[in-house]
């Protein structure tokens, strides 16, 4: 009986709690995204339903449920129904593996090869998209599905390769150990700044988000793979997309930004400190984790508001000609540093890069305009 | 003329500064005040010379019918009868308005009636700030004298700036926002 509790009931309960929290976030993301996009574009976004438009979170699912569910007459019925459901399953399964707080209480299933499992599961998400695109019997849908497949295959490689650097530093495939390592040393985005950048770009591409949203490019493919989907099936596609976004944000936070801890070099809120406070400490850790995750979700929206869409050959160029060599080079350099026993040197490189970016982006005193004006005047 | 933009250095390009600059721009836009006016709750006050809905003053009107003549599409309907009345101890023949209707659904708001009006201040004018004229029935846009004079739930005309001498003065005791006296 005790074994049943340990290995079945408790993990299920934990998974359900995590699942519900995640689904609430996913539903809220719809409103947050539309609102923030509106703000960036000098409008207000949805603000009519309820206070500040918050009831839009409820109104949207209700609308999706009540709409007519149209199935194209010539669609491949079984594949058409499987299309929206298939990408949901792996993304939901991944929530079992992600440590939301200090283990063992806040991890549904602690696996010592968690990262491999996560990579394997998230990459199956493309099946639903390509199946849905093909089953719709619509050339635009099919093209969206094919684009999605090509894009996912291309960016799966740098996605996986960028993690290798982290694994080499931390020496473990267990996400819990990686997070603890980051709390004891620096967060991985400092020594692995290039890997962090590659990971972020490839995860944006994996999720088919702007600027990599070619599978659903409205101006070219109507709606891409979900052109023929309506009502709740369409909502399932959206749900899968946002869930996958959240999974990837959880991953980047766990791998590069210290997970549930708020500590570097053993100072601050490490797992030991949080565990010392018991359940409350665990809740604080989970809160820190979700704050970090939400920050990255906001960055997704920020990217969407800023960058225009790539052309398809540019997308492939970036993936194969830049991201993969860069990731391989990162592995090479990291290996050299580890062999030479100079891991601390990587911290300084990371700090130097971040410092250079901050230096160049410092508020300038309208220098750009003066330079621009001077160059214009010289032409005349 | 070819505009030369300042070239970014190698290190600037390597750090993707152009993209970060773009992100900075959108972030700045995020916190700027928004220009949207949430219409039913917030209303813009129209400009002073805004030509809104008609306003008609029974007291000023001398029933000369010049506005009806000036109207290019003949949508002003005026009926008048003569009446013997005692004014200043003398019996006088006066014209009395029976009917002053405007079929606003056909009106093009040319304000020729306002120009034709001989009274000063004008007894019909178009510079009210009312623009909410939508109705559920097209016949609701046929206005009679009382409707033209007293707007139900409609804002009063605030008047032109004081330096404009031709502004219509609303007489005392007539400023009722709804209902007939």
Image: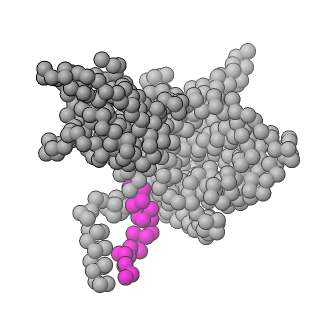
Q: Is residue B105 visible?
A: yes
Q: Residue furthest top?
A: A1
Residue at left offset 15%, top offset 23%: B90
Left or right of residue B169, residue B3 in this image: right
Q: How is the image coloured?
A: one colour
Considering depth in this image, is A295 or A69 the residue closer to the camera? A69
Considering depth in this image, is A98 or B52 the residue closer to the camera? B52
Left or right of residue A121, residue A357 in this image: left
Where residue B104 appears, x then y in whole percent? 44, 37
Left or right of residue A188, residue B122 in this image: left
Q: Is residue A261 above or below residue B30?
A: above
Where residue A307 appears, x then y in whole percent? 50, 58
Q: Is residue B72 above or below residue A143?
A: above
Considering depth in this image, is A294 or B107 the residue closer to the camera? B107
Q: Is residue B169 above or below residue A189?
A: above
Q: Is residue A117 visible?
A: no
Residue at left offset 75%, top offset 46%: A228
Residues shaded magenta: B1-24
Residue at left offset 23%, top offset 63%: A365
Q: Is residue A156 above or below residue A65?
A: below
Image quadrant containing the N terminus of chain A: top right
Q: Quadrant of residue B3?
A: bottom left
What number of labels is visible?
Answer: 0
Image quadrant containing the C terminus of chain A: bottom left
Residue at left offset 21%, top offset 26%: B92
Residue B15 inside the magenta-drawn segment: yes
Where residue A93 appears, x then y in whole percent? 69, 36
Residue A292 inside the magenta-drawn segment: no
Where residue B31 appears, x then y in whole percent? 35, 46
């Amino acid at each position: 009986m005790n074994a049943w509790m340990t290995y079945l009931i408790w993990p299920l309960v934990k998974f359900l709690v995590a699942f519900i929290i995640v689904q609430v976030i996913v539903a809220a993301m719809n409103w947050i995204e539309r609102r923030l996009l509106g703000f960036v574009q000098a409008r207000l976004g949805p603000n009519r339903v309820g206070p500040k438009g918050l009831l839009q979170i409820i109104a949207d699912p209700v609308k999706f449920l009540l709409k007519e569910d149209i199935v194209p007459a010539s669609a491949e019925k079984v594949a058409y129904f499987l299309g929206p459901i298939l990408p949901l399953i792996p993304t939901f399964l991944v929530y079992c593996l992600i440590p939301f707080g200090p283990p063992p209480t806040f991890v549904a299933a602690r696996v010592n090869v968690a990262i491999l499992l996560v990579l394997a599961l998230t990459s199956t998400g493309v099946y639903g998209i390509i199946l849905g695109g093909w089953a719709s019997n619509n050339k635009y849908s099919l093209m969206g599905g094919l684009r999605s497949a090509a894009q996912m295959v291309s960016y799966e490689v740098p996605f996986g390769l960028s993690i290798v650097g982290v694994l080499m530093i931390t020496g473990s495939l267990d996400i819990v150990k990686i997070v603890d390592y980051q709390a004891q040393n620096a967060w991985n985005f400092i020594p692995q700044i290039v890997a962090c950048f590659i990971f972020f770009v490839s995860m944006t591409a994996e999720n088919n988000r702007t600027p990599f949203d070619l599978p659903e490019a409205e101006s070219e493919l109507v709606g891409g793979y979900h052109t023929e989907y309506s009502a709740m099936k369409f909502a399932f596609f959206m749900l899968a997309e946002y869930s996958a976004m959240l999974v990837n944000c959880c991953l980047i936070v766990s791998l590069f930004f210290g997970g549930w801890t708020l500590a570097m070099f053993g100072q601050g809120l490490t797992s030991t400190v949080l565990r010392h406070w018991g359940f409350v400490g665990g809740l604080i850790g989970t809160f820190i984790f979700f704050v970090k995750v939400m920050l990255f979700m906001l960055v997704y929206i920020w990217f969407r508001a800023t960058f225009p869409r790539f052309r398809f050959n540019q997308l492939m160029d970036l993936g194969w000609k830049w991201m993969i060599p860069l990731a391989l080079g990162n592995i090479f350099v990291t290996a050299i540093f580890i062999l030479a026993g100079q891991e601390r040197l990587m911290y300084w490189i990371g700090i130097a890069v971040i410092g250079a970016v901050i230096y160049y982006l410092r508020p300038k005193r309208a220098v750009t305009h003066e330079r621009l004006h001077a160059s214009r005047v010289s032409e005349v | 003329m070819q505009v030369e933009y300042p070239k970014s250095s190698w290190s600037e390009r390597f750090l993707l500064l152009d993209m970060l600059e773009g992100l900075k721009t959108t972030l700045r836009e995020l916190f700027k005040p928004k220009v949207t006016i949430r219409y039913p709750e917030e209303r813009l006050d129209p400009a002073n010379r805004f030509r809104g809905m008609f306003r008609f003053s029974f007291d000023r009107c001398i029933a000369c019918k010049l506005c009806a003549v000036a109207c290019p599409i003949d949508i002003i309907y005026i009926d008048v009868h003569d009446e013997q009345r005692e004014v200043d101890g003398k019996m006088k023949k006066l014209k009395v308005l029976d009917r002053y209707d405007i079929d606003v659904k056909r009106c093009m708001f040319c304000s020729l009636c306002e120009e034709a009006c001989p009274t000063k201040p004008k007894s019909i004018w178009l510079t009210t700030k009312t623009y909410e004229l939508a109705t559920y029935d097209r016949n609701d846009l046929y206005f009679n004298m009382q409707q033209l004079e007293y707007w139900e739930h409609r804002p009063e005309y605030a008047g032109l700036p004081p330096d404009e001498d031709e502004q219509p003065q609303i007489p005392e005791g007539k400023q009722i926002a709804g209902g007939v006296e």
